[in-house]
């Protein structure tokens, strides 16, 4: 699990490695869940956009929590 609930700031330099990890998960057998605080608007917008990398078998999950 990658926990981003306390993340204060995110830009392209931050999001690029996250996207690379999620993309690698698609082709492998590893599992990852990304946790973020959905009550912080910019986090909700950024991490919701990453849902395109979720897999149907839930090897890759983007989870918003309050």
Image: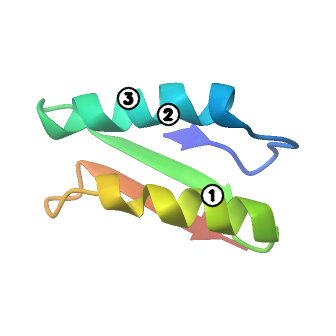
Residue drawn at the location 40% of the way across and 62% of the way down: 51
Q: Say few, some or many: other residues with alpha carbon within 10 Å of mark 3 (under 14 / 14 to 19 / 20 or more).
A: few
Residue drawn at the location 18% of the way across and 40% of the way down: 26
- The percent coordinates of residue 37 (x first, y second) are 72, 63
**Residue 46, numbered circle:** 1
Residue drawn at the location 80% of the way across and 43% of the way down: 7
- The percent coordinates of residue 18 (x first, y second) are 49, 33
What residue sits right under mark 3 in the picture? Answer: 21
Q: Say few, some or many: other residues with alpha carbon within 10 Å of mark 1 (under 14 / 14 to 19 / 20 or more).
A: some
- The mark nearer the N terminus, 1 or 3, is 3
Disc 2 to disc 3: CB gap under 8 Å: yes
Disc 1 to disc 3: CB gap under 8 Å: no
In three-dimensional space, the C-alpha distance between marks 2 and 3, rounded to whole angstroms, equals 5 Å
Residue drawn at the location 27% of the way across and 39% of the way down: 31
In three-dimensional space, the C-alpha distance between marks 2 and 1, rounded to whole angstroms, equals 11 Å
42 left or right, relative to 32:
right
Farthest right residue in view: 8
Foreground residue, 1 or 49? Answer: 49
6 left or right, relative to 20:
right
Q: Secondary structure at mark 1?
A: helix
């Amino acid at each position: 699990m990658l926990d981003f609930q306390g993340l204060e700031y995110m830009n392209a330099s931050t999001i690029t490695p996250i996207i690379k990890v999620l993309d690698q998960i698609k082709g492998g057998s590893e599992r990852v869940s990304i946790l973020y605080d959905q009550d912080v608007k910019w986090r909700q917008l950024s991490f919701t956009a990453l849902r395109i990398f979720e897999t149907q078998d839930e090897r890759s999950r983007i989870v918003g929590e309050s």
